[in-house]
Image: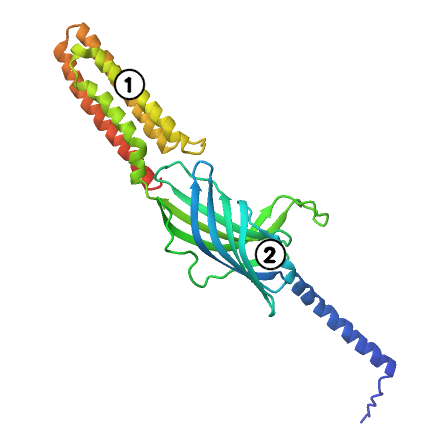
Amino acid sequence: MFNVHLYPMPNNWKLVFISFCLVLAAACAAPALHAQENVPDTVKTGIYINSIHDINFKEKEYTISLWLWLKYKNRKFDFMQNLEVPQAKSVTKSFSTIDSSGEQVYMLMKLQCVMKDAWAINNFPFDRQKLRFAIENSQFDSRSLVFTCDTLGKHFDERFTLRGWRIDSLNISAGTKVYQTTFGDPALTKPRSEYSTYKVKLQIDRDAMGLFWRLFLGMYLSFLIAYMSFFIHYDSIDSRFGLSVGALFAVVGNKYIVDSALPESNTFTLVDTLHGITLFFILLVMASTAYTLRLVKLEKFEQSKKFDFIFGQSLMAIYVLLNCYFIFMAVTGH
C-alpha cells in the first residue's frame, strides 16, 4: 500500500485561486449587467378623449381635447417639457399635475391639440376618416424609453357627438417610429433614429344622406330640366336647346360650389364621377336634339317622335343605373 500525502496549498496560491474565481465571476456577470443597462425604461400611458370638434375638412385639420396620463420611474424623462405631438399644429396644456412622492412619477395633463391629418375624399360624402393622435418624447429615443398602453376603462366620452359623424372604433397601440436622420447626433453613424411612440387611431363614419342631397340635388334637377326637352314638341326646337344649355351651365356651377368645400385631390372622386356623368348625358340630350332637328328638316316626323321616345327612355335608365352603381360602391367603401 502506498500512502498519498496531500500538502497544504501555499498562501500565495490561495490568493491566485481566489482572484481567478473573482475575475471569472465578473466576466460572467458583465454581459448580464450590460444587457440590464440597455433595457429601456417603460412609460405606462393612458388617454381619455373629451371631445373632437372644429373639423375643418378643407384645411385638413380638427381639434381634439383629451386627458393624458403617464407613469414612469426615470425622472429625467420630464414629459412636461419633452412631450412631442408630431402631427399637431398647436398644443395647449390647460391643466397638469405631477406626483413624484413614490418610486415612480405620475403625471396627468389636459391637452387641446389642433391636429393636421390627411383626408380620404375619394368617396365623399360617403367617406370614412381615420383621425390619428400620437405622442413621443423629444429627448429620449427607443433605446432609453418605450411606451406601454394603459387599457383599463373607456378611452373616450360616449356622450360627446360629432355633428354629422358617427364614431366607429378606437384603437390604441404602442410602437416605434423611424426617422431617416441622425438629428445631428455625432454618436450615430447611420441616418436612422428610432423613437417609441404611443398611437391612438379613431375611425369615424359620415352620416351622409342629408349632405348628399344638399350637394347633388341641384345637379339632378339640372339633368331633369335637360331631360324635359324630350317632351317638348319639335316645333319648339329652340326651347329644347335652351333647356339643355342652361342645365349644362347649372351642373358646372354646382360642381364648382361642391369643390370649394373640399381639399385639393389628385384622384378622381365620387363628386367628379357623378358630375362628369351628368355633363356627358346632358351633352347626349343636346346631340339627340340635333339629330331630331335633322329628321324634322327631312320631314320624317314620325321617325323623330319614335327616336325621342326610345332614346329618352334609354338615356334615363342608363343614367339612373350608373348613379346607383357608383353611389353603392362609395357607400360600401370600394
Q: CA gap, disc 1 to disc 2? A: 62 Å
Q: Is residue 124 left or right of residue 2?
A: left
The residue drawn where x is 46% and y is 39% is 60
The residue drawn where x is 69% and y is 64% is 34
Crowding around mark 1 (Cα neighbors within 10 Å: few <14, some 14 to 19, many 20+) is some
Q: Look at mark 2 in the image and give the residue it sits on.
A: 79
The residue drawn where x is 77% and y is 74% is 22
Residue 201: x %, y % from top left: 45, 50
Above/below status of 175 relative to 129: below
Above/below status of 106 relative to 130: below
Q: Is residue 13 left or right of residue 151?
A: right
**Along the line of sight, which residue is nearer the eye, 277 or 139?**
139
Give, as a three-letter code, the residue at label 2: Phe
Give, as a three-letter code, the residue at label 1: Gly
Q: Look at mark 1 in the image and give the residue it sits on.
A: 246
Above/below status of 94 relative to 8: above
Residue 90: x %, y % from top left: 54, 45
Q: Residue furthest front?
A: 94
Q: From the image, which quarter does the C terminus lie in?
A: top left
Work out whether mark 1 precedes mark 2 in sequence or the reverse, and give the earlier one: 2
Say if mark 1 contacts mark 2, CB within 8 Å: no
Helix, strand or loop status at disc 1: helix
Residue 164 quadrant: top left
Residue 76: x %, y % from top left: 65, 60
Above/below status of 145 relative to 280: below
Residue 7: x %, y % from top left: 85, 87
Q: Is residue 57 left or right of residue 22?
A: left
Mark sitting on residue 327: none
